[in-house]
Amino acid sequence: MSTQSNLIAPHGGHLINRIASAAEKQEFLEQGDRLPRVQLDERAFSDLVMIAIGGFSPLIGFMGQADYETVVTDMRLTNGTAWAIPVTLSVSEDVADPLKEGSWVRLDDATGRFVGVLELTQKYRYNKAHEAINVYRTDEDKHPGVKVVYDQGPINLAGPVWLLERDPHPLFPTYQIDPAVSRQRFDEQGWQTVVGFQTRNPIHRAHEYIQKCALEIVDGLFLHPLVGATKSDDIPADVRMRCYEIMMEHYFPQDRVILAINPSAMRYAGPREAIFHALIRKNYGCTHFIVGRDHAGVGDYYGTYDAQKIFDEFEPGDLGIQPLKFEHAFYCKKTGQMATAKTSPSGPEDRVHLSGTKVRAMLRDGKLPPAEFSRPEVAAELARAMQI
């Protein structure tokens, strides 16, 4: 069995833990009613959780202006550490005005529940269009990530945070495997190389193919579907998780695969988010990360393989996790199996291509995805969920 020292180091060198101790939680609760309050939306709350559990290591809180600006322009924190997506807490002027730098701020979730504390070190304005162009490569508000930026407040609140308590996930408590635990699990399995897989879509045959190709060269596979905030037309998280459970039961070697949830929110930032997703999985203990066609993309904003090309802008030591770049997989009628352009002898007429977007459209139109695209048990589950 491997030892802890054989696991990949978290990004920045050590795993962040900003979950309050019992004594700290009690102290915060005693002060809670006297503190100014900021209510977090779904994405900000998931960011708070990801910071607290170490998923966003080395961040210990919401970004100050200097880190924010270097991340937006250069994909680096001010200390030179690679980081691709700004993690900020944006509020309205009315909320920000009474808050004093150097003070404590109570953080409530969308229901008004006291969930965390911010040590406010800085308030600053930021340029929304500049963030949109640099991070999302567009300033169109039709892009869901850009729309979030445009709709949020003009003031960012910065500083270290504490999460009062790590609650079990309301839908998937058994799959809530935080970075400290996933690292322990990998170590117990004796895995020294682990490949992570990110998705916000139900699993299909192309996913299965590239996951199993990756599994041929590493010790274990970490299936890590995102269950935080997504677009309204994305398949709901509970449906996607049931599809993965079906695959785990019937089609994967269970001793070499761990299924867990990623509680973070989607940004739909394409190439930038591919880097972001890779660093998150590094914090969970992955040494490799699958990057396929149009990773974290939306619409036609990004080139098919832009999310793979962006990794070439970094030196290997900058990221510390190895991307596994896969071409678009399809069902090859000539060979009767999944393939890519690298392995298939067939022409375009013998290739069955479908995307998650097309499958969602088929389901909305009352059609089942074909067997060449989806395992029948998964197709049946999607049909049941969509009430076809």
Image: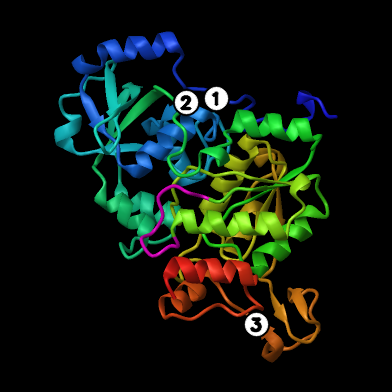
Q: Earlier in the sequence, mark 3 or mark 2?
A: 2
Q: Which mark is residue 16?
A: 1
Which label lies toward us, 3 or 1?
Answer: 3
219 is within the stretch colored magenta: no
| Quadrant in the rendering for residue 188 | top right
Which structural element holds mark 3? strand
Classify the position of the C terminus by image quarter: bottom left
Q: Residue furthest right?
A: 1
Residue 59 appears in the figure: no
Q: Residue at x 61, y 54 (%)?
A: 245
Query: Which residue corresponds to mark 2?
Result: 60
Check disc 3: other Cα within 10 Å, few if <14, some if 14-19, many if 20+. Answer: some
Stretch of the chain drawn in magenta = 226-235
**Position above or below: 232 against 106:** below
The total of numbered circles placed on residues is 3
Give the residue type at disc 2. Answer: Ile
Image location of residue 363, percent across then percent down: 46, 75
The reply to whether callout 1 and callout 2 are in contact (CB within 8 Å) is yes
Residue at the disc numbered 3: 352
Tell me the crowding category of disc 2: few under 14, some 14 to 19, or many 20 or more residues within 10 angstroms, Cα based. Answer: many
Quarter-of-image position of residue 187: top right
> Quadrant location of residue 204?
bottom right
- The percent position of residue 201, horizontal first and vertical second, equals 52, 61
Q: Quadrant of the N terminus?
A: top right
Q: Label 1 to label 2, Cα distance in Å?
A: 7 Å
Q: Which mark is residue 76?
A: none
Q: Residue at x 56, y 47 (%)?
A: 277
Q: Earlier in the sequence, mark 1 or mark 2?
A: 1
Q: What residue do we see at 59% from left, 52% from top? A: 198
